[in-house]
Image (spheres, rainbow, N blue to C red):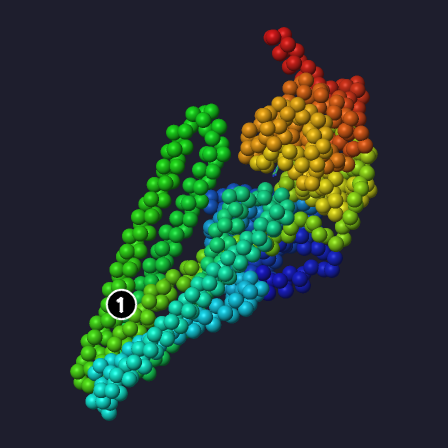
Amino acid sequence: MPHLVRAKISGMLPAGEEELIRVSTDLNQEGEFGTQWVIVTDKRLLIVPTTGLDSVVKVPIDELTLVQTEALVGGGRLNIERKDKPTIAVPYSNSLAEKFSEVTRGIEQLRKGGAFLINTQLDRTRCDKCGKLLPEKNGICPACIRRLATLQRIATYLKPYRKHALLLTAVSLIGMGTAVVPPMLTRQIVDGVLVPTGEHANEMSERLALLGLLVLGLIAIRVLNWGMEWAHGWTVSWLGARITADIRNRLYQQLELLSLQFYDRRQVGAVMSRVTRDAGRLQEFLVEGLPYLIINTLMLIGILSILFWMHWLLALLILIPIPFMLGWGVLFWKRMRLYFNKWDQAWSDIMATVNEALSGIRVVKAFAQEVREIATFGAQNKKIRQLAIRTETNWEIFFATTTLLTSFGMLIVWFFGGREVVADTLTIGTLLAFYAYMWMLYEPVEWFGEVNSWMTRAFAGAERIFEVIDTPAEAYRDPAARPISNIKGEVSFKNVTFGYDKSKPVLHEIDLDISAGEMIGLVGRSGVGKTTTVNLICRFYDVDQGTIEIDDLPIQKIRLEDLRSQIGIVPQEPFLFSGTVAENISYGKPGANFEEIMDAAIAANAHDFIVAKSDGYDTQVGERGSELSGGEKQRVAIARAILHDPKILILDEATSSVDVETEKQIQEAIARLTQGRTTFAIAHRLSTLRNADRLVILEGGRIVEIGTHNELLEKKGIFYELVQLQQQTSEIIAVKE
Ligand SMILES: Nc1ncnc2c1ncn2[C@@H]1O[C@H](COP(=O)(O)OP(=O)(O)OP(=O)(O)O)[C@@H](O)[C@H]1O
Ligand SMILES: [Mg+2]
């Protein structure tokens, strides 16, 4: 926010008036490109233009009659309707539409005097700073990276290996020296031994001695160079492997600790590419790119000094092709960057297609859509093929052109240098040294055009990694939280409101007190918020309003680890890890002995089917449990939840995939188990909940009925209707049979 605007606004707000929303538009009042600020406080709405600061519009909240957005071509308008006064319209372009609909929701909440809940983390498709389209949703803008800050942060990864980094620098510098010296020695060989001039001209023995010395020198330098190359290679691999492993570890650690909210907003594929691709790019930059850049810059300076010292005019002349080479390089890389981006995109598209089509291969086959999937793949593959051809041809052209340009340099040396040799103002040795240095000079220049795009890529990768690392993790180590090793299992919801998107609550003002050991049945239509309710008990998400208390303690005050280790959950879609049945049952309690595992399996009515398999408890379940039936998977999941003896047991449609007979057995087992445990059971098959102490009926995100099975039946309310409906359907089926 510009300083002037900020000063203006802070002058306008009296003490005690709280600023709640601050957004900027990208159009001014006349609909041209420009900025206006919309500020919403608990009492007023201000519209502040950046030019003409005196024309601030102030509207008290209680003067508003309606605030709404209106979609227009290419943009929209925030219409602020007031009592007995003309409506104010604030225009914005399409890229801000989502933001303004959220703002509207917030203002309306204030106007109606309800809770103020808006979503401050909207999906970003454009950069906040420069407005450019982002390469991926909520991603990093490559144009706005603060390079120096990023570089400093990248360098911290080198810190633990300071000694090796220094060694790498030293080795590279010496290596550079060994590359620069040889042409000077060959110059001596030519001028002092082969075609000597001046005083040594005729002394054969002296010339031979010099030759021997110089060759020895060359050998020494070659050996030194070999040693340095070897040391360089070793340090680079040593450092590279460690740094990538460090970055990957740090990143994965963070990924495990991040909240579910983080994953709700992102594609798993994109997150995974950070662990693999971005970490790789960062490492490449650190141990290969950065030293290469530094060494080559130093080398260029060194060589240029030598060249100018030997013959400044000729040195100037061979610089002529360099601007052309640089210009050509910049042009070329600009184009290549485009191809590389397309290439990246095409690859991630094709990977997504393959991933989805193969994970969903059953659906593909069931609907006989193989041909369509093959065609989709074929089209994407063709795109990659075309890009491959274009990039390849571009490379060829690039190298051919650079070779042409460098050969001009060569001709300059031969022509002008040759004339001076003939005129005896330049020795042949110097000419040859010039020739050798010229190549060393041109080679890095070819690559300098790339440096920019290549650094951008590495920095963007680094930023993407840092973004993950900087996302606040779940509060596992919250020092304010209390360790509780033994909870009783009282759960109470106090005026709880929650929505995955804050401004669209799923649960409204839930009040519910559950005593320890009680079994609660949650009933309601699909999508009403049953799973959401239990998600909140596990603190997978934090409530937006109100509190959840366990044993009279706000859930945020309980150590997350203690909380979750005392909750056993059978999720709606049970997930098994590849491995054996026994390993899956003991997932939550890795050290469990076989007896415990078997007891849990018996309780979950899984024992019989497990021992009927040829490998018994050692049966492999396949990836995601794909080798088990739906009902078998559910029972393994129940056993897993039971095994670590939780104080709070959550069964989310836990028996939906088993037959009625098995369900009855599981219910009996669970009835035994639920003694002394608080249980939440969710089921669409209402007969399942007959054992529950109380049933809670949800409708529209609110609790509409609470009571025992019989009470609710007598009440003849919503629950009664639902039971009637289910009975009718089962009767119809019975009649048909
Ligand atoms: N991770 C999520 N992100 C955004 N919205 C979600 C998410 N999970 C659920 N929702 C939405 O919240 C609402 C409640 O979902 P919930 O899973 O609690 O329903 P449910 O009562 O368990 O339904 P069902 O009986 O079908 O399992 C639904 O409208 C759903 O679309
Ligand atoms: Mg559910």
Q: Do we see residue 270 in this rendering?
A: yes
Determine whether, in the image, residue 180 is placed left or right of residue 141: left
Q: Say which quadrant the N terminus sits in.
A: bottom right
Q: Which residue is mark 1?
A: 406
Q: Residue flagged by tag 1: what amino acid is it?
A: Thr
Q: Is residue 591 above or below residue 421?
A: above
Q: Residue at x 24, y 64 (%)?
A: 404
Q: Could you say where residue 603 lies in the image, as x and y percent from the top left?
A: 72, 27
Residue shown at 57%/53% (left/top)? 249
Q: Residue furthest bottom?
A: 199
In the figure, 484 relative to 531: above or below? below
Residue 13 lies in quadrant = bottom right
Task: Tell me residue 142's x, y (percent).
Answer: 47, 57
Above or below residue 28? Residue 570 is above
Q: What residue is at 71 percent from the left and 21 percent from the top?
A: 665
The percent coordinates of residue 633 (x first, y second) are 61, 29
Question: At 39% from the left edge and 35% from the top edge, which residue is drawn?
Answer: 376
| Residue 642 appears anywhere in the view | no
72 and 586: which one is in front? 586
Q: How many marks?
A: 1
